[in-house]
């Protein structure tokens, strides 16, 4: 073996990983985090750490020659995406045939690129999705713990009613109410007070400067500012950026050895090394963690892994769509890139939908209302290992997303009827009004209680754990990071109490 040996390794630095590392660090356990993306702390030539959506450069995307934003066109014109230099940028899109999955890459994972919406799921749906998890404990203890540690805050309702930043949301609210639908404020980890000061011209703009999917330079409480900062503060956690875990095998002391590829700043792999750990926590996200275990099972390095590895995947029913507004209904050129309002029709027995009112942060009036609908679709995909490419392939067919489109269509047909409006058909590269060939919310692959026990311990592999979105079987009914965070809090508390032979801090 080359490389060092440590008590615990956490793979990834997204939500599940960050929670786990903090709690290990607090318990006095020396912990190394491996993150394949960059540490985003150094300004580029323009003085900013991240680029914005209007002028993207290499920092935007993970090792691509061109940006791949979810809105592919405007008036059918290819004006949204741009050629860029190939660089280990912050947003990745992994294409799997009929489904493309967007992911954050870098220290902080998805928290670097997401819309910051911090939504606790509906309790009855959480109980349906994860019946083995004690909901009293989750709602009484772990959701509050997660939202506090994530720095979740709420928009000031008075400011919301008068600000420019959310004119687009007020317009969509009026349209929804006209159709008899209910709207609700969405909590956020973007600092709403910072946003207010952005609009007042007191601080540099970020949410108001078209910054979101390629990173935010200000205002967002991403994990590097919350859980990961606290984890480093314990003095027991270190983060190795540009380190990708590629393979995992047992060593003869009962622990595990990871094969690690290190990249340089240009994204080239410059070193292959190993690290040994008594315990390994997989927090590489639904795609990353599932791929590691599939590869381990199918190449024979962890042959005891079972048939549940790679099962139970879903896109959280994501459907994106745009509506064409009347000329007199302006959404405003100044739009907060961080949503603050949703249409809540989840209780509709036939067409359950939770639709976030999304911005089009273009800096100019476009007469479009955009939405990301989360629908309730029981279809699931699965992964298989492809030896030719040494990677996991997702099996998800377009037809499996059809129910999600029906649900979204039922809701937005109502809104269009009540307002005399229509769908935009120019946004997704062809003439489709509904886009469900991508997801922001990949969930599942290593489902809790199936691939693992009820606390994320991988079946057949003592000392190996799953901590991230791959535990959740394909759907949460709302944006998922609060659920991932709270579940990781619950699981690591139990694991620390039961799996260390003596109190870990002694
Ligand atoms: P996550 O994906 O966050 O982190 C995994 C990390 O592991 C990444 O940093 C990755 O680079 C790293 N990694 C992967 N494989 C590795 C390997 N082999 N070795 C080392 N490192 C590896 N959710 C929400 O609740 N509200 C919202 O507003 C949004 N908005 C949104 C917008 C966009 C554009 C995206 C892409 C996503 C969202 N989401 C969201 C989804 C949310 O960000 C997502 O559910 C979580 O980040 C998932 O957390 P995980 O802990 O599962 O992994």
Image: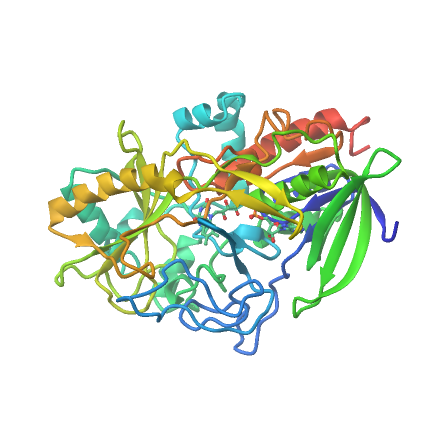
Residue positioned 54% across, 21% down in the render: 132
Q: Can residue 147 be seen here?
A: no
Q: Residue furthest bottom?
A: 45
Q: Is residue 167 above or below residue 478?
A: below
Residue 168 spot, x, y in % from top left: 25, 56
Front in this rendered view, residue 78 or 441? 78
Quadrant in the rendering for residue 86: bottom right
Quadrant of the snapshot with the C terminus: top right
Q: Is residue 282 above or below residue 37?
A: above
How many labels were placed on the picture?
A: 0
What residue is at 40 percent from the left and 53 percent from the top?
Answer: 192
Depth order, front residue of 146/2: 2
* Horizontal side of residue 201 vs 464, given as left or right: left
Q: Is residue 353 left or right of residue 112?
A: left
**Image position, residue 218 (x, y; %):** 48, 62
Which residue is at the far front?
388
**Residue 417 occupies quadrant:** top left
Residue 142 drawn at (x, y percent): 54, 31
Q: Is residue 492 visible?
A: yes
Residue at left offset 40%, top offset 50% = 437
Compared to 56, does 426 lie above or below? above
For this rendering, which residue is in front, 370 or 172?
370
Q: Is residue 324 left or right of residue 429?
A: left
Residue 347 image offset from top left, x and y in percent: 29, 29
User: Residue 280 is drawn in which quadrant?
Assistant: top right
Judge left or right: residue 150 versus residue 252: left
The colour scheme used here is: rainbow
């Amino acid at each position: 073996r080359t490389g060092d040996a440590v008590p615990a390794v956490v793979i990834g630095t997204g939500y599940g990983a960050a929670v786990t590392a903090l709690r290990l660090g607090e318990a006095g356990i020396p912990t190394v985090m491996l993150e394949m993306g960059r540490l985003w702390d150094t300004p580029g030539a323009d003085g900013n750490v991240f680029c914005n959506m209007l002028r993207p450069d290499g920092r935007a995307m993970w090792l691509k020659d061109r940006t791949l934003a979810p809105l592919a066109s405007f008036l059918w014109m290819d004006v949204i995406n741009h050629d860029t230099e190939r660089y280990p940028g912050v947003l990745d899109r992994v294409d799997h045939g009929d489904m493309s999955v967007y992911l954050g890459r870098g220290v902080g994972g998805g928290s670097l690129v997401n819309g910051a919406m911090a939504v606790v799921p509906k309790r009855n749906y959480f109980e349906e999705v994860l019946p083995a998890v004690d909901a009293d404990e989750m709602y009484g203890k772990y959701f509050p713990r997660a939202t506090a540690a994530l720095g979740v805050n709420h928009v000031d309702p008075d400011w919301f009613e008068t600000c420019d930043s959310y004119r687009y949301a007020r317009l969509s609210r009026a349209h929804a109410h006209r159709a008899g639908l209910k709207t609700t404020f969405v909590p956020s980890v973007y600092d709403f007070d910072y946003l207010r000061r952005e609009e007042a011209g007191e601080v540099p703009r970020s949410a108001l400067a078209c910054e979101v999917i390629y990173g935010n330079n200000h205002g967002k409480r991403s994990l590097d500012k919350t859980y990961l900062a606290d984890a480093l503060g314990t003095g027991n956690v270190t983060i190795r950026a540009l380190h990708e875990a590629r393979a995992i095998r047992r060593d003869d002391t009962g622990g595990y050895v990871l094969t690690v590829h290190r990249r340089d700043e240009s994204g080239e792999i410059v070193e292959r090394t190993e690290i040994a750990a008594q315990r390994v926590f997989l927090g590489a996200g639904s795609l990353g963690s599932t791929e590691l275990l599939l590869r381990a099972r199918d190449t024979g390095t962890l042959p005891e892994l079972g048939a549940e590895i790679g099962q139970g995947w879903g896109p959280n029913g994501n459907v994106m769509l745009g509506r064409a507004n009347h000329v007199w209904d302006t959404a405003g050129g100044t739009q907060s890139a961080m949503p603050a309002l949703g249409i809540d029709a989840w209780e509709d027995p036939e067409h359950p939908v939770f639709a976030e009112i999304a911005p089009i942060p273009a800096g100019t009036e476009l007469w479009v209302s955009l939405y990301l609908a989360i629908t309730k679709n029981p279809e699931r995909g699965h992964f298989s290992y492809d030896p030719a490419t040494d990677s996991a392939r997702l099996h998800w067919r377009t037809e499996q997303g059809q129910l999600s489109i029906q649900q979204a269509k039922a809701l937005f047909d109502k809104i269009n009827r009540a307002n005399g409006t229509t769908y935009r058909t120019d946004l997704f590269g062809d003439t489709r009004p509904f886009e469900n060939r991508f997801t922001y919310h990949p969930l599942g692959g290593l489902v809790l209680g199936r691939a693992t026990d009820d606390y994320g311990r991988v079946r057949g592999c003592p000392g190996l754990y799953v901590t991230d979105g791959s535990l959740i079987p394909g759907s949460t009914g709302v944006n998922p990071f609060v659920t991932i965070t709270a579940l990781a809090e619950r699981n690591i508390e139990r694991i620390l109490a039961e799996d260390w032979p003596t109190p870990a801090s002694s």
